[in-house]
Amino acid sequence: MIKKYDMILAAEEAFARQVALGVIVTSPLTVWHTIIPFMFIFDFVKRGKIIRSYTLHFIFPRKLAIDAAQDIIEGEDRKERLLRVEKDIKAWLNALDLYSQALHDTELEVVHFLVDHYTKLLQANGDTYNDLVRNVYVNRHSYTAHLAQLTSLEKEVDRALEKLRKIGKLREKILAEQQQLEKMRQKSVKQIF
């Protein structure tokens, strides 16, 4: 099961990096890139930090979910394990200075949804992440329906975040991220099925 756990986590991290890269690469190069030698190095470092930061925030609830799924499969009581997840989400949001009951509740819904998804993946047969997904969802329609539910839950998280942080640029970032997520998910469906 450790191999499956590592495959799933690695696939989620790679997906997060691709989404982040797709969002930030859409920013055009400035005049400074041609005037100042090695400006691209500073830009590269900055983009690397943004990608790492996005990946950490994207992965945190997913890692909570996959850890919980593995513990539940190994016999831990589901209700008790999900209570620990709830506390972890609250602590995470507090650490980011983003706590609100609405954001907490929507993040928790995403994690509960993902716990069920990862439980299925961890119990499936397959040598690759794509094999696991194919064996759980069987066809493109079923997997697309799963992704549509996940997207809907993520948009609820985005709405709760927007209500908490009423920043104009935040809306632009969220829209860019949602578009990139949709694009990458469509690509993954084509690769898997």
Image: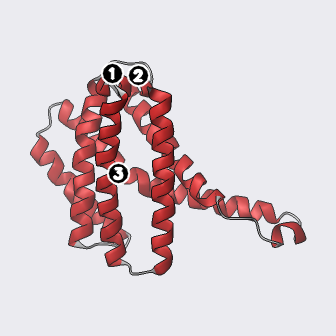
Element assignment for label 1? helix
Can residue 103 be seen at all in this image of the molecule? yes
- Looking at this view, name the residue that lies furthest to the front: 141
Q: Residues within 10 Å of mark 3 (few under 14, many from 20)?
A: some
Residue 139, above or below 20: above
- The image quadrant where one finds the C terminus is top left
State the separation of the CA atoms marked 3 and 2: 22 Å
Asked whether, in this view, residue 14 is left or right of residue 32, the answer is left
Q: Residue at x 26, y 30 (%)?
A: 120
Query: Where residue 77 appears, x then y in whole percent?
Result: 11, 39
User: Which dot, 3 or 2, sits closer to the camera?
Assistant: 3
Height in image: 86 above or below 117? below
Residue 111 vs 132, above or below: the answer is below
Does residue 34 appear to the left or right of 7 in the view shown? right
Number of numbered discs? 3
Q: Amino acid at mark 3?
A: Thr
Closer to the N terminus: mark 3 or mark 1? 1
Say whether residue 165 is left or right of residue 117.
right
Where residue 192 sits, quadrant-wise, is top left
Q: Which residue is mark 1?
A: 135
Where does label 2 land, which residue?
131
Q: Nearer the viewer, residue 117 or 183?
A: 183
Q: Is mark 1 in CB contact (under 8 Å) with mark 2?
A: yes
Q: CA distance from mark 3 to mark 1?
A: 21 Å
For label 2, count other residues whose C-alpha is less than 10 Å away and answer few (under 14), some (14-19) or many (20+): some
> Could you say which disc has been placed on residue 160 in the image?
none
Residue 157: image quadrant is bottom left
Q: In which image quadrant can residue 67 be found? A: top left
Badge 3 vs badge 1, beta-carbon distance below 8 Å: no
Label 1 sits on what residue type?
Asn
